[in-house]
Structure formats: C-alpha cells, structure tokens
Amino acid sequence: MRHAPFPKAQGSLARSTLIKMGVRIAVIITLATFFSYFHIFRSFRTEALEQMEGYLAERGQREQAHFVLAQDNHSVIKKALAERFQAWSQRDPDPHFDRLFARLPDGTIRNEPRSFDGRKMPGVFVPRGVTDDADFRRRLLAAYEVVAQYGPAFHIRFANTGVILPEGVLVGYWPGGATWFQDVAADFSLLDFEYFTLGLPEKNLRRESAWTGIFEDTPSKTWMVTVATPLDVDGRHVATITHDMLLDELMRRTIGDHPPGTYNVLFRDDGLLIAHPELKVKSGAEPYNILNDARKPEAVFEQGGTAGQLAHLRGIVEQVRARPEGQNVLELSEHGEYIAVVRLKGPGWNLVTVLPEQVVSARAFDVARYVLMFGLASLLMELGIMYWVLKQQITRPLLTFTRATDQVAAGDFKVKLESSRDDELGRLANAFQLMAQEVQHREDALRQANEGLEKRVEERTRELQEVHRQLVETARQVGRAEVATNVLHNVGNVLNSVHTSALLARERLAGLKLEGVERLGALFEEHRADLATFLTQDERGRNALPYLSQLGTHLMEGRQELQALLNDVGKHTEHIGAIVKLQQRYARTPQHMFEPVQLEELVEDALRINQAALGRHCVTVERNLAELPPILTERHKVLMILVNLISNAKYAMDAVSEGERRLCVKLERLADNRVRIEVRDNGVGIAPDMLTRIFQHGFTTREEGNGFGLHSSALAAQELGGTLRAQSEGPGKGATFTLELPEAPEKNRMRLSA
C-alpha cells in the first residue's frame, strides 16, 4: 500500500531555535542595558557632583587669594599708618607740607605741580573748605608717606592704593590715573561714595575690611571693586585704607574657565550680578540686581536677555540663599540642573557652577548605548557560532531523517540511517530503522489480508452509504424543524393579530344586517306590478326608502371597517412573508438587504401588529418617539425584533392588574451615530441570575414558550451591527429591553449587500 509523501517542512529547526533564543537574549540585554543606564547615570551624577564640588572648592581658594591678599595688605598698611601717625605727632609738619603741597587758586590743596609725577609718587586732593591745621597736616603727611612706601609695591596686584581722611581728603598712588589728582574738579567730593561711607563708624560697627559693590571705571571702561579698611586711633576714626581691584580677569575666568558642559555665575548675597556667560552689563549702565532690579533687560545687558533667563537666574540666587549651612551642592529639579556653590572670602561673593542634568544623562546614555551595541554584537557572534553547531549536529541529521520519512511514506521501507552516534539522534536512528522494518512486516500482512477484505469492504460501503443517506435526511428534517420553530414563533406573534383582525371582521360581517336586504328584495318582488303605488301609498312601502338609505349607510360603514381589518390582515400577512423569507435566508449565506428605514414608522407598525393583543390585555402604550432621519438597515429584521420585544412585554404584564399595565416605547438618537429603541414594561421583572441567560437558545420562563424569540432577536441585532440588552431591578419591578443600531452599516456590511 503506497502513501503520499509528507509535505516538506518550510522552516528550519536551527533557525527557529536561534530566533527564539536570540529574541529572549535580546530582551534580557535590553533590560540589562535599561537598568545599567540608571545605575550608570547615578554613578556619573555622584562622580560629577563630587568633581564639581572639588573643582569649585579649589577654584574658590584660587579666586579668593587676591581678595585675602588685599585684606592682608591693609593689615600691614594699617599698622604702618598708625605708627606713622604716632611719629608725626611730635614733629613740625609745616616745612615738609609746604615743600610737597600747595594751595591752588580754586581753594583746593594738591601736589606741588612743578615737582609732581603721578606715575612715581602719590597724588593728593584736599577739597575746598578743609582746615589745614597742624593735626590735619600731620595726618596728611603720615598718609602720604605710607602710600608712597607701599603703593608702588602693591601696584603689581592692585590698580591703586589709597588713604582717605575723614574730611574727604584722598591720598592715592594710581599710575593709571597719573593726572587725575591735578585734573579733578575743585567741587569733587568723596563723601557720598560707598568706599568712603564703609569706613565710618556708623556704617562699619565691626571696624573690619569691607567691600563695595562693583562699578565701572569710566576712562578704562573696566569693572572694579574697592576694599575699604577703617583705622581708629584712641577710639577716633582717623583714616580709611583702600585698594581698587580690576575685575576683568576674574570675570573672564568666571565665564571662560569651567568644567565641560557646565557654566559659572558670580553674584553677591543681595543679588548683585558680578559675572554671567550670557548676561553682560552694558558700558555706562548701573550693575544689575537679580532679585529686585525693575529695569528691562535690553536696557541693562548687551545681548538683551529673556524673562526666562532672568527667572532661572533668580531661582539660582534664591536657592543659594536658602541653602542649609554647609551644603554646597544643590539640585534645581524645576530646571533639571545641579549647582555647586563656594563663598569667596573677602567680598563674600558666591561662585556657582551649574551642571545641566542632560550632560550627565548624555554620558550615561553613551555608555549604555555602547553596552547595548557590544551586547548585541556579542549576541550575533554567539548566534552565528550556535547556528553553525546546530546545523552540523542537528539540522543535517534531521534532514536525513526527513528524507527517510519521505522514503517510508512512499512505501520504501529499506532505509539506512547513521546509527553509530551514541546520543539521542543515534538512538532515534536505531528506533526509526526498527520501526521501518516492523512497518514493512505489517505492510506485507495487510496486503495479504486486504485481498479477502475487499468484498467485505464493498458490503460495508453500501451499508455506510445507506446510513449516510438516512443521516442526511435526518439532518434535513432537524434543519427544517429548527427553521419551522423560528418561523412559527415569529409568525405566531403576527398570527395572533391576524386572528384578532379576522374575529373582528367576522363580528363586523355578522352585524351588517344583510337579511334586511333579502326581506326588502322579497317585498319589492311581491309588489312588482304596483311598485309605485306601494312606495307612495302603502305604509310599509313609504318606510322602505328611508330604511334602504340607513341600510346603505350601515353597509358602507361596515365595508370600511372590513376594509381596514383586511388591510391589517394584509400587512400582517406581508410581515409573515417577510419573516418566512428572513428565515429562508438563515439557511443560505447571509445577504443583507439594507434600505432606508423610518424607525418611527417601524415602531408604529410593530405596535399596530400587536395592537389587538395589547388592547385585549388592557395595556396602555406610552410613546416617546423622536423624529429621526431614516437609517440604513434591514426593515423586516428590525420589525421582527420589535414585535418579539412588545409581545414578550405583553405576556410579562399578565400578573399586573388591569388598568395598571404600562408599556413605554422610546426612540432617541445617540451621540455616536447610533439610535436607541427602549421597550419598558412594569411586569414581573427579571431576576439577576436570569439576566445572563435570557438570550440563550432554548431558555424561557413561560410554559408555552420555546426560548427562541430573544435568542434570534439578539442574533439579528448583532447581524445589523447593533446590540440587544436587558435590564431589570429585580422580580416585580419590570424590565427594559434596549436595542441599539448604527445609523449606517459598516463598510464591510455594505460590500456584502452590494
């Protein structure tokens, strides 16, 4: 006996195994990369913050060295100036004073013009109105000698060195402004300058070095700051020592020298901006206060600046001011940044380094991407090696087995396989060869037995054909019975109305009084010869014509009633035909007959079909029908559903007293291009456990019911693209059946009907 060969496999076991393994390993690599990214990100963030904090601490030591040096210089000058005041207290100051200084015609005292060289010696400016008594002269000479001694030495680091006396007198070594002391206006006053007021006792209670805000040197257009240190002798304020420091190098380093991906900001505690990489104050403009400056950015900064930048900068300042003592690294979560802060000794300025979080995340992402790519490359290499091994050790032996299987399937049982291997495939080869030999033996036995069984097979075949014919006939009868059950159930609802209409027609026909016509005809036949005399003179003849008129009216009314009843019968009969056609379509491939349907009229038709039964059961019908445009659906299928629902509602109200039976029918349009029809009754209701079974085939609560109506209605609603649902609050509380339909069928349904 020959068999058709097995179909050849289109796939490869090795390839499918590798694909499955590769996908799983790739998922593991991806997850590992994902978690590695967060670990690397946290590690990089910790490392970056530690490096930034260390960098800023070292940077702060370097930047504040200049300020600390200035204060140390002032300590030296302060001591020397106090000693020089003491030394001049016992000497006559006039000869030396007159040799160095001269009172000019404008009332000021300045250096002797003929011997003064501002590049090599200190300059002196004494405003008008200062009394140059001996004490004043001694203090001025002491200040002059100290500035002359220390000014040139400190000029390497500081723009100038000065001593201010309480009278507003200035003694300063300033080579950069060599002629300033000779050119300054006679009415110039230092009394309102910050570096002067910082030396006053009421402004500097601790009597220590203090730093002014930054200001621009007008001739050089260079930003500067002044440190002022007061000197008191015997409790009396006698002088203020000053250094002017240029800030251009500090600003340049603040803006340009920073770790990769970061930027620096320098500002004072009160919000005075010193340096920012994008916000540079215009020449001639006053310094900008971040916290309370009301000027527009374009009036202050060279590049304008935006409200977002200023708000961001304000947030940094407020965060720095509010930070706990000793906490130098902060997180600005609202801006996705980290900041490190160091406070510069001397002026107390805050040097802040800002690190955007995306810098750290980008580094972490690069590392995670490298891990992912390396993992995937390793995976591909490993899969390649595994593929070669599987192909040599599994795929090729399996192909040999496949060819042997095809050979056996073709009827050739003499197969030879490599059985020298001691693994699973070797044992399988031995078993396969034994199986082929056993099949060969059985094939021979079957061939011998087959010759004697042919006749028995023919007889059995005839028997089976007869049984098959009987089964087909039985299946047809069962199918016809199921169709008949569906038709009878739906037609039965309509036949009740047909029967009611027929009974009413019979009653109307019995009441037409046709026997009066027969008697009147016999009376006219009796008086045929003298019909005119009979109609005018005989009393019965005179009543005949009025009676004939009334009889005609009565017959006309009866005819109209009969015609109306027959019209109803015609509609019911048409619906019965539609139901039959509908059920016939159930036996064939569904072909939807969609047409425009006015649902309000269809609801009225369903009520009219059940009108006689509803009237007989004293059911009051309440209508709430919205005027809707026609929808595209199957008219008779929707009508069948509505007739079923109304008929079921009528039976559900049998237990309710007459006069209290209410049937409410509601038609409305929904927001999603769907319409809803509700049929609500106040009948026996539905138990909660029955709500889940009420649409099952064969389920019914009525003794004479067959459980097919709601099942077929639910199926019909689904075929129309809608739904049929039941709701009830429980037994005795009525029930509501809701039919929802689309205004137009789906595209695939339209193609079926095309």
Image: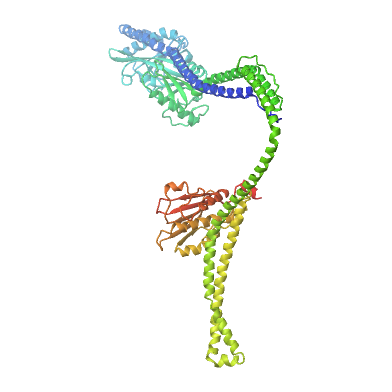
Furthest-left residue in this view:
234
Across and down, in percent, residue 446 comes to 68, 30
From the image, which quarter does the N terminus lie in?
A: top right
Across and down, in percent, residue 487 comes to 57, 56
Furthest-front residue in this view:
452
Closer to us: 417 or 142: 417
Closer to us: 72 or 513: 513
Across and down, in percent, residue 339 comes to 45, 21
Residue occupying image coordinates x 55% and y 80%: 515
| Residue 639 seen in render | no
Q: Is residue 480 above or below residue 342?
A: below
In which quarter of the view is residue 193 placed? Answer: top left
Colour scheme employed for the rendering of this structure: rainbow
Q: Is residue 733 above or below residue 134?
A: below
Across and down, in percent, residue 698 comes to 51, 49
| Residue 165 seen in render | yes
Closer to us: 301 or 689: 689
Closer to us: 481 or 145: 481
In which quarter of the view is residue 132 placed? Answer: top left
Residue occupying image coordinates x 31% and y 13%: 232
The mark tally for this picture is 0
Q: Is residue 27 above or below residue 554?
A: above
